[in-house]
Image (cartoon, rainbow, N blue to C red):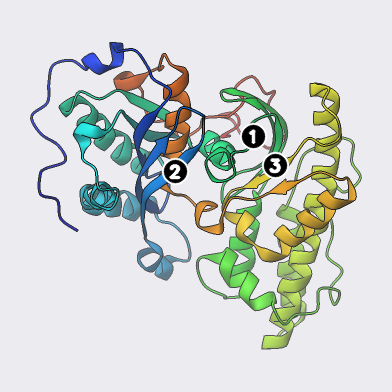
Amino acid sequence: MTSSAPIIQSPKTECKAERQPRKAAALVLGVETSCDETAVAVVKRLPDGSGAILSNVVRSQWEQHRPFGGVVPEIAARAHIECISDIASEALKTANTQLTDIDCIAATAGPGLIGGLLVGLTFAKSIALAHDKPLVAINHLEAHALTVGLTDSIRPPYLLLLVSGGHTQTVLVRDVADYHRIGSTIDDALGEAFDKTAKILSLGFPGGPAVEAAALNGDPQRFAFPRPLQGRKEPHFSFAGLKTAVRREAERQQPINDQTIADLTASFEAAVCDSVIDRVKLAHRMAVVEIGEPDALPIVVSGGVAANKRLRSALEKFATTIDVPAIFPPISLCTDNGAMIAWAGAERFARGPLAGGLDTSARARWPLDESAAPIIGTGKHGPKA
């Protein structure tokens, strides 16, 4: 991947573009480096609020982290440094555009691994300053929350179920930049539970796809795993106990064979689906009451775990029982990508004025709803999301 011109040129002393009037139509370059994907995309937002992906280049680091059974932050940050400029050049080339045509640079500023965030945000600041472009710092969770506006032209309000490697929560999306967190996890996120289950059963990394593949031929009723917090009045999630139940059952089944692994993973997925549906059902009722909308308030599901076919099917079936639409971004946009960052930047840019800009710092912890009260399990530094 090469570029005919350098991405970063001689920097200027100020970014005058940040003082220029905003316009509804925008061409935005998005940069994502919050974990183990290096991603850059170009997205176009039209005056009517619709959008189009002109390019979306993602380089995964799975092979570099696989020997360690999980993401190593130092390796991730170095890998971002090695390829981010080439990926940005490829994204511009694929979009048949150049930086002079870009209206705004958007970059993930948090939450995530601080080393990776610093790489992407610093890169974005450099090209924004060098090319006199405004910069908008994006909350990674907000990008997941708004993706359906790009892919399906869905506008708020809606209930968001965000399920990813580090975050599991339900959020009432009232509007762009207006979020109310309803429920969150008190321990492991759902993606972490998938990864740890895969590690327990030696299925490899990344854990989510490995567990899903192993469960295809399994019996989901063989093992009666717990459904954490099912029926509870508080709308939070918990998956640590489920993960522990899988470990204990696996220990009892030694020596373990392929069919038992299939049954363990299928039973794990069944428990996950039941738990998630129970929590979403409660959160949806609470969201409807809060916003005063009819029961047709859509359910939007985003994040890496939203790619799991058994969970998608269960959520779609549940949504039909309460006569509401269940909306999922394409699987390629459920995992981390630059297009969702660019789109969130476009939505912010269209509303202006932009906050932070070149003065923004990377944040390992950045709750989507910063006014949300802490819950049990948030740790001494408060909630990370």
Q: Is residue 86 left or right of residue 51?
A: left
Residue 298 x, y percent position in the rendering: 75, 39
Type of residue at label 3? Answer: Thr
Tag 2: Cα neighbours inside 10 Å, few (<14), some, or many (≥20)? some
Task: Name the residue tied to disc 3.
Answer: 185
Residue 383 x, y percent position in the rendering: 60, 31
* Whether residue 228 is situated above or below residue 219 in the rendered picture: above
- Name the residue at 82% across, 57% down: 317
Label 3 element class: loop
**Mark 3 vs mark 1, CA separation in Å:** 9 Å
State yes or no: discs 2 and 1 in contact (Cβ < 8 Å).
no
**Mark 3 vs mark 2, CA separation in Å:** 33 Å
- Name the residue at 71% across, 58% down: 312
Give the mark nearest the N terminus, 3 or 2: 2
Task: Name the residue tied to disc 1.
Answer: 378
Type of residue at label 2? Answer: Ala
The N terminus: image quadrant: bottom left
Q: Is residue 74 left or right of residue 207?
A: left
Task: Name the residue tied to disc 2.
Answer: 52
Type of residue at label 1? Answer: Thr
Tag 1: Cα neighbours inside 10 Å, few (<14), some, or many (≥20)? some
* Whether residue 109 is situated above or below residue 350 in the rendered picture: below
Q: Nearer the viewer, residue 307 or 118?
A: 307
Q: Marks 2 and 1: which is nearer the front?
A: 2
Q: Is residue 319 visible?
A: yes
